[in-house]
Amino acid sequence: MSVSLHVALSSVVHQMLPALSNVLGKAAAHAEARKIDQSVLLNARLYPDMLPLSRQIQIVSDSVKGAAARLAGVENPSYADTETTFAELQERLAKTLAFFDSIPAEAINNATAKEINFKAGPAELSFHGTHYVLNWVFPNMYFHVATAYDILRHNGLEIGKRDYLGRA
């Protein structure tokens, strides 16, 4: 049995973005119940040289919309990265999911051998479609979702693996 590139990508996106949005909802409730300013959690980091929680969420969003746009050969929507609340980050994830869902499955499936070139920091990267999803998009998405989860867990949010997997 083979799995199409769209099915593989869509199943991960549709699991991780709603799970992350749910965790952000729990974080907002946690902050409110404990009278913690949301900015404290949104600016929290695991280590001083790591990016804060809000940026982790933005990068997850950027990974998904960038993948969909590059694979389909459409313009990658630009988001301002100005979110300052959990609700704004949840809106961003919803907007990202809506953009992803606007891309026809065949546009992604037709990109399995498409050359994908882009810049990541100072590096110029080049992949074929399938390898781009498997070796760049998935690892980056999982890294930043897990880091967001870890930041919140480290700051007292009572979440577990079921939350990360979207099964809570």
Image: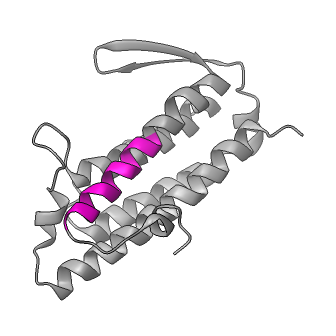
Total numbered circles: 0
- Figure quadrant of residue 48: top left
The N terminus: image quadrant:
top right
Residue at 38 percent across and 65 percent down: it is 91
Location of residue 13 in the rendering, given as x and y in whole percent from the top left corner: 57, 51
Q: Is 6 situated left or right of 124 in this image?
A: right
Location of residue 119 in the rendering, given as x and y in whole percent from the top left corner: 38, 18
| Residue 151 located within the stretch drawn in magenta | yes
Location of residue 120 in the rendering, given as x and y in whole percent from the top left corner: 35, 22
Q: Can I make out residue 40 in this image?
A: yes
Residue at 10 percent across and 65 percent down: it is 40
- Figure quadrant of residue 124: top left
Q: Is 92 situated left or right of 7 in this image?
A: left
- The span picked out in magenta is 141-155
**Main secondary structure found in the magenta portion:** helix
Up-down: is 76 above or below 83? above
Up-down: is 151 above or below 107? below
Residue at 49 percent across and 43 percent down: it is 65
Location of residue 37 in the rendering, given as x and y in whole percent from the top left corner: 10, 74
Q: Is 25 situated left or right of 108 in this image?
A: left
| Residue 6 located within the stretch drawn in magenta | no
Residue at 15 percent across and 56 percent down: it is 44
Q: How is the image coloured?
A: one colour
Up-down: is 91 above or below 68? below
* Residue 93 vs residue 69, the one in the foreground: 93
Q: Can I make out residue 81 in this image?
A: no
Q: Is 150 situated left or right of 72 in this image?
A: left
Residue sticking out furthest to the right: 1
